[in-house]
Amino acid sequence: MVLPLLIGVVFVTFMLVRVGGLDPVGLLAGPTATAEEFTMIRKDLGLDQPLWKQFLIYGGQVIQGDLGESWLSNRPVLEDITTRSFISLELLFWGIGLGAAIGIPVGLRAAFKPNRRFDQVTRIISLLGFSIPTYWLGLVMLFVFFYLLGWAPPGMGRISLMVSPPEFVTGSYLIDGLIEANWEAAHSALTHLILPVLCLAIVSAAPIIKQTRAIALEVIASDTVRYARACGLKIKTLRAIVFRNSATPIITFVGTEITGLVGTMSLIEYVFAWGGLGQYGLNAIVRGDFTAVQGYVLTLALFSVLIFLIVDIVVAIIEPRSQLN
Amino acid sequence: MNLLKITDLQTHFVFHDIDNYRREARALNKVNLNLNRGEILGIVGETGAGKSLTAQSICGLLRPPAKVVGGSVLFLGKELLSLAEEDLNDIRGAEIGMVVQNPKSSLDPLTRIGDQLVRIHQTHTASAVSVARSKAIAMMHAVGIPDPEKRFSAWPHELSGGMAQRVLIAMALMNEPKLLIADEPTTGLDVTVQAQILELLKDLVRRFEMGTIIITHDLGIVAHYCDKVAVMFAGEIVEYGTVTDIFRRPGHPYTKQLLASTPEKLKLNEAGSLGGQPPDLFNLPEGCLSQDRCSLASDQCRTPPPVITLETGQTVRCHFALQ
Amino acid sequence: MPPSVTHQFTWPRRTANRVRGLSRLSPTAAAGVVIIVCFGVLALFSEWFMTHDPVSSYPNRILQGPSFEHWFGTDGNGMDIFSRVIYGAKFGFGIAIPAVIIAVLIGIPVGLIAGYRGGALDEILMRIFDGLRVFPSIILALAVVAATGQSLLNVVLVLGFLDSPVFARLVRAEVLALRSSNFVESAIAAGNPTWRILFFHLLPNTIQGAMAQTAVRAAWAVRISATLAFLGIGIQAPTPEWGAMIRQGAEFMVTGQWWVAIFPGIALIFLVFGLNLLGDGIQDILDPRRRASK
């Protein structure tokens, strides 16, 4: 079931770039190229073949791990992507982690006391969270915490230019710095992490709050909880029942959120010059580096598929009703 | 003292629908019931007659938009309708046991059934877990679950419908309730299983001297297992008395219709109705609620019928009861 | 429960009734409508509200803070930000409304047909939609717009197209539920041609959920078009579109000229917020359990 999905993903990525009016040859060749140079470049890129052949060639290359070369960086796209993926993963991890850590408890609390003041305030705030553009939020935070208050470092990169990064163990400057006992690096990494993570957390908390509340409300209205009340179980026990029965849909939802969050994360990377996959990909799109765009979109899609798989596995483990058990 | 005395219970649906009209429906209208220890009362009627609502109103388990708007429910002299949720919680599952419909969707799917039995016991009594566990196994044995030691760690979804129903009964009985309310305890089960469960119930009721309310749309069950019966229609009790009296000489046209239409098996059809539309609670006729289907209906029926007590002691809500 | 819905052609009247009850039933929806109407007025009648011409620059007044002359200050080209923000409302509506209309016009018929016909067509369509879901929507929109050429029309088309699966899926689910119902069967038995069944019988009863989504999708369209402009795709520099204005203001944020990026952002937030309020309010109305208790 996953295989056709993967093929489809590769296909869409492939078509994405060839669909429109972008002419990579023109971009590569520059304005002064002659007709011969055009044909040469075209041949070089394999663009003189019929479309279906190109697709097969591309598919074959992907399987072998060859994602082509970025004409911007003149390096293999695969290399560009792998180095940056860990960087983005760190941001994503902290961001969604914080977002879920805030969002789920708030959503649950709102569901337990629906339509009282906490709930109504929370709903408005979470709707606001839906409406704030992440990049704008990042800019405002930079303005307030860097320019006005001087608490945060300038939004450039993951570590201060004057601090040397720690040895590569996990790819996270913060963790590696701590492992190494390199307090300076760890501290710098932490201060640089705070603002982008906060932005990501705020934006991801909003939908999580809303959905958690909806899920919990449904569980509360279910036969199971009703019967539990008929048994005279204590409120604490009822809450635990609601929580456990909401877990699966909430986890599934967070998984879907993550796949969407990657896009938002890319924007934040762009604003904070994070140097991760997102910034790389956005730059590639904007500047028409089409091999890099292909690689970027492909990676994102594969990541999403992976997340869905992980969610399925987790759910299968915790649910006694699943086939596994 | 009565175990349960319900007086003039009134429950309404109140809500604003999409067209912003305030809609109020009389879901239960002046329901009066009496129950003593060791008695089995059957509440019978079509789907939508208000049987389950009565049970839910007693225990404070109504779902919005349903609300109790009047009347009194005295359980061992205590007024249940004015109790706070915590106090009601203490009574539910302990002194009042409920067996609900849909056993498979009511059991907590994420807890093993043995643990659920222990849980309901621990909630209401301070005893050791081992004591609760042995009691649970004994109870599972009593309700006829084979191999209780092994089944103790089963998940709810692994059980069949009949097995799940037995678990619900076991759960209701764990704390030796004085009142047992069983809402459609055998719907959806096949005939042999039905008979087993009902025999079991009857036996347990005698043993523990519980007052029991069985809610059903199956007249056969009422005939074979109940001592008293209340016939409900459109939220009202139209006839109430002992099973022997009412089955021998039904006083209300609707009761007569019920008994006549189902000769041998005394069973209402699949959907639990005699056919025809269930009454629209928001557009009830003036006066007697069953006038639309009653052969005896006349102009007099446009005034609310009185509740007449016949010589046998049964009560009938009809103008023509004495005929 | 209300009297059973008679599935005749009464849905225009019913909808009108519901609209009347809207504001009393859901304050969120009412608040949302108020906000949207305000912006709508600004968009339609911007000439009345603007203090200056949105695209003329005052070269000797670059990067001035808010003042009596320029209420929101001036930007890097010396243009008045207040007027530009007001004018930008046109883009918000001008992109979101057509995009949602396109999405509805594509999505609803597709959903109706897929749900009704079923079979291979349905399977394929659903697989395609599922496949698309794997890509983060922002990136997908970005990539496609960037690839297909950067004009306003393209942005609208792409957004409308990418949004249609949402509507298709909703309508399809409702159609599936109703397909085997009595009244559809009797309509078929009465010899109605398929297109009539689809549009006169099924359509009115299945679009409720989809209609509730229009506000939410419009909010999304406004957000994404601003994001595109922020990245410099689809809308070029001197155009007074909010996203583009934020883009220009980004470099000035860290040097202290906050007004260039903050005001367009606030306008954007409010419009999207209003649309989300409306969408949330509509959901409240349609699903009685979520309504605020009386």
Image: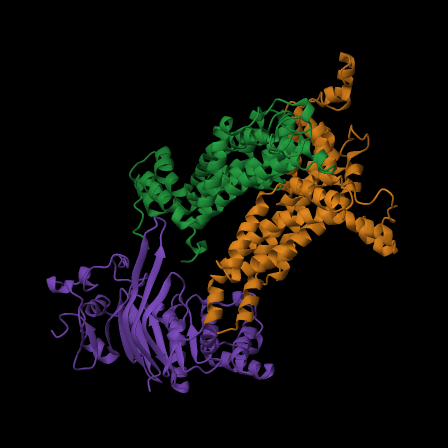
Q: Which residue lies furthest to the front in this view?
A: C68
- In the figure, residue B206 lies in which quadrant? bottom left
Quadrant for the N terminus of chain A in the image: top right
Q: Is residue A297 left or right of residue C216?
A: right
Location of residue B309 in the rendering, given as x and y in whole percent from the top left corner: 18, 78
Task: Indicate the position of residue B229 as horizontal and vertical percent values.
Answer: 28, 76
- The chain drawn in purple is B
Q: Which residue is drawn at 11% across and 62% down?
A: B299
Residue C2 on image: x %, y %: 31, 52
Residue at the outermost top position: A35
Q: How many marks?
A: 0
Q: Indicate the colour of chain C.
A: green
Relative to residue A9, is residue B15 drawn left or right?
left
Picture layout, residue C153 above or below residue A10: above
- Residue at x 61%, y 55% (from the top left corner): A103
The colour chain A appears in is orange
- For residue B53, which quarter of the picture? bottom left
Using the image as rendered, state which of residue B150 and residue C267 is in the foreground.
Answer: C267
Q: Quadrant of residue C293?
A: bottom left
**x, y (%) of residue B156?**
53, 67
Q: In the picture provided, is C213 more to the left or to the right than B249?
A: right
* Residue C106 seen in this snapshot: no
Q: In this orientation, does residue A239 appear?
A: yes
Q: How is the image coloured?
A: by chain
